[in-house]
Amino acid sequence: MTVENLSLHYLTRRGAVRAVDDVSFQLTRGETLGLVGESGCGKTSLATALLAMPSPPGRIVSGRILVEGTDILTLPEPALRSRIRWEKISMVFQGAMNSLTPVYTVGRQMRETLQRHRPASRAEAESLIERYVRLVGLPPEVVHRYPHELSGGMKQRVVIAAALFLEPRIVVMDEPTTALDVIVQAQILNTIKELKTALDLSLIFITHDLATEAEVADRILVMYAGRVVETAANEHVFGGEACHPYTAMLLAATPRLHRRASGLAFIPGTPPDLLDPPKGCRFRARCPFAFARCGEEPPLREVSPGHEVACWRFE
Amino acid sequence: MTGGGALLAVSDLAVSFSVRRSLRQVLAGQRSLVRAVDGISFGVGRQEILGLIGESGCGKTTTGRLVMKLLRPSAGSISFDGMDITRASGMEAARYRRRAQMIFQDPYASMNPRFRVRDVLAEPLSIHRVGAGRRERAGLIEKALAEVKLEPVEEYLDRFPHMLSGGQRQRVATARALILSPELLIADEPVSMIDLSTRAEILAMMKEVQRARGLSILYITHDISTARFFADRLAVMYLGRIVETGSPEDIVERPAHPYTRALISAVPEPEPGRVKTIRALPISGEVPSAARIPPGCRFHPRCPSATEHCRRDPEPVLEDVGPGHAAACRRWKEI
Amino acid sequence: MLLLFLAGAALEKRLITYPLTDSRWHDITYWDELPANAPPAWTNALARQKSAVSLLSAPTRRTEETSGSARLVTDVFSYEYRYDLPPRDLLIHFRAAGDMPVALTLTRPDGEEITLSREQVAGAEGTDVRISLDRSAGQAAFGLLQEHEPADVMAGADADRIRPTSVLFAQGAPGMLANPVALKGTYQITLLAVESTEKARISDESLSVVGRVSGLLGTDSSRRDLWSGVVAGIKWALLIGLLTAFVSVGIGVIWGVTAAYFGGAVNWLMQRIFEIFSNQPLLPLLIVISAVFKPSIWFLILIMSVFFWTGPVKAVYALALQIREETFIEASRALGARSRRIIFRHMVPLLIPYAFASMALSVPGAVVYESTVSLLGLGDSSIVTWGQVLHDAFTGGAVLGGLWWWVVPPGLMISLMGMTFSFIGFAMDAILHPKLRVR
């Protein structure tokens, strides 16, 4: 997948909130791209944009999303529904495990989703569902259970299975483990890794927790205030070669269990208002290294192979 | 730990709730008992921060409420500064409430949305009749806000909770807990609903306050990483019991109880090279319901090193595994 | 709508033509100048034959002449008569002190001058004197008839049975007894009084035309101006409605919150008491109480409040239960707050928006209950309420007599007031409900 100059704005009464502002990146086959940033940086908005489904009042105002050569943003809605969503790209939404209807069994809900995309007999649907339920590590009886009878971890696995059973190539996961306990989280991350190799998936994994990203992502994309400020390989970011001040500070603020660090760092201040973003580098107000040139918006530039940073310090 | 004995001592504390299951069971006269806290004992020393860690459902939040006397225990005792307060009520309870205070997890929910910051902070003063007149009370309120670094104070006094950020709200909640100058603070997940980048700031503020005032804090959280830096001692809870206690370093680097080990191994680390590995998690299955606690050692169904004895023998109690380090597992040496 | 009502109540003194309506509703003499059962004045616009309208006027010209030891006071009243149907009566009022002879003359537009009456007024210090044409001008009218009607018609005429005004305002022509045609124009009524003694004095002279139609809403059978009655009723309706609503909702809210907060045995007890009260049929009870005790309005309000409180309780209970689970309530308890503080400083204030909506919806109920009780004749007779007016209407044969102006306005007002508050209540409900989720 290639994303070029994507912008998504929320058109509110007070003006356009520029949630995603001119974002470009590439996802290579079989890679897990980790999208990381704090709340409000635009990552969830970007996720909805990738499926061409901005939640109102959001609108994709510019850019292209190329999937297998086609710009899906040019496709009409019916085509998107029948050919793209869930077929080529699927998504595990934030808090999806809580959006399961308590009235129907889990299996029935999965079957309904399946049958909306593929005409299949009940028997065919059920066997397909069973296959994927096993794949995510659940016992097949789970399909007969109601959501409230399942634990958080189990519900999340159900949702992941539902995102996979139409065999998409790309799966976007928005904070899939954030609400879960740490042990369950670790178990699900293991499952995700196994699924990725078994099904040859390419993942976009969104979270605000850098530590989790370290566990799953091959490449990291750091977002701040609607823009991408850094893209780098996992080893570079966590190996200490992160360049952008925000990334560095985010790393410093992420608590580590085993390091002998004396205390946690924090980033003073708050993210800028996306209704009227400041001129120049958006991180300027909170950056300890800001200097004169930061009044001008730095472009994303490659500083070493596969490593791009949007910061004037590296020119 | 500084001298004078523990400020807060809890002994065999337990609380259970009865839950009706299905109509069938009601007719059969069965009642499920959810043993949320099933006999725990611990102490918080003076000027000490004890971190109570565990996953959701382990009973740590309930423990906090029990200590705060928001819940009545079914068994056990709580003593504060040498006095048994388990069954205290009325005047005694009111006196206890001046010396022990609580900070809640959700900073927005813990304040009445119609109260301004000024009103939120005035409430404890008015309840306990502290402060002779309006001016004195206003002074106390302003000092409290300054202590939690919400300055300039005038800017915040008249705001409503929805006009504050998450971090600011939690500061106000902290100020409210501090305004009566308590000796014990019970902090229930104080930063889990706050942005990552501000978490450290709030915790730093709380630690500074603790040092300045010599407070004891019972810090309840599921986030082991922050607990490691914030607390002086840790206690790990599982399914209503404490399974291990020790210094943060002991717990993190040399966990003795199998559950603690699983917990530590499950924490993600921002280190390179972890993408390729599937982490070995020395634990299986899910947390059982507190209504159906497994016999014997309650962790045995999930323990990778469990034996028949673990199921048949009575539940293990905390025994020393090192200086200041105790775990509730009889086989800790072999594992 | 509400503003209109409030304005009406507030400006009552200015609006109503008869300021002492309230206290004098049952005093016949107060209303003596008005016609009985007269439709509203504006119906003239709709009627083919215009009726004379009641009015009160001061003298157009007043002269005093002194001749010798006596003073001659001449008042001339001008009256524009443009109607087809003459007024029922003309009244001349004045205040007299001492003895004096008084003469009343009518000058018609056609030039005829008729002496209406000659009287000797004997008054002690400051007596109110009223000369009514109806009573005193019979002879004069008869005389006018004789001038114009043929003898055979006169033979059948009875002086006592003639309505003076029908004749005096009719054109002088044969047939004026049976089919009077109105003589339109300016009439002048001259009052001549001789203040013969030193102490004799005449003052405050006024002419009152008792029309066939009167006022903004007509009159009832007791000659009371209904507009004044209706406007006077506004404040009572507002009072009854709002006071009952306020007290009953106040009790209801506190009841619901307390029951929800304490739960357990307290709640159980409160629920049972609630059930006892809410199962009472209020209307029959009110009727019985009113019949037996003849209560004042305040007592009535009290009784109604005692039963109305059950209205909001259930909803408040549910809401209060929700609020009780909020973390900030728990936080208050952790701070050491006592139950009373939590109930009154936290829970009740959060329910105030709902309470207002509930109050608005209670008002119509209270007004209607009181109206019903008054309609049955059991209400407080010392005040004017719409229900009372309606009661008088029914007993006074308004429906049968086609006196729509008596029945419709009060009934309409009751409905309007009910509607006003219901709409306010619904609107508040709609606005508040989503927000009522505390956050």
Image: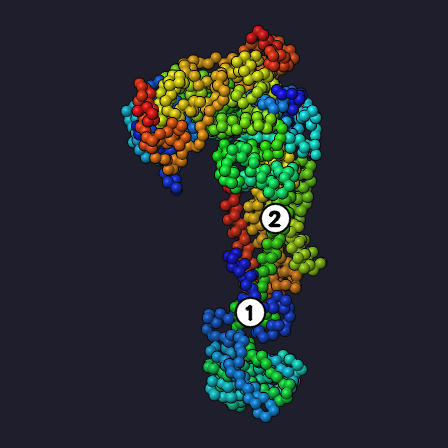
Residue linked to disc 1: C17
Identify the subunit bearing mark 1. Answer: C
Name the one closer to the observer, B84 or A129. Answer: B84
The image shows residue C181 at horizontal and vertical percentages of 48, 81
Identify the subunit bearing mark 2. Answer: C
Q: Residue at the far bottom: name it.
A: C68
Q: Residue at x 57, y 54 (%)?
A: C364
Q: Determine crowd level at label 1: few under 14, some 14-19, many 20+ residues with C-alpha closer than 10 A.
A: some
Q: Number of callouts in the render? A: 2
The image shows residue C106 at horizontal and vertical percentages of 53, 85
In what element is the residue under mark 1?
loop
Name the one closer to the observer, A120 or A5. Answer: A5
Q: Quadrant of residue A245?
A: top left
Q: Residue at x 59, y 58 (%)?
A: C237
The image shows residue A268 at horizontal and vertical percentages of 45, 30
Residue linked to disc 2: C249
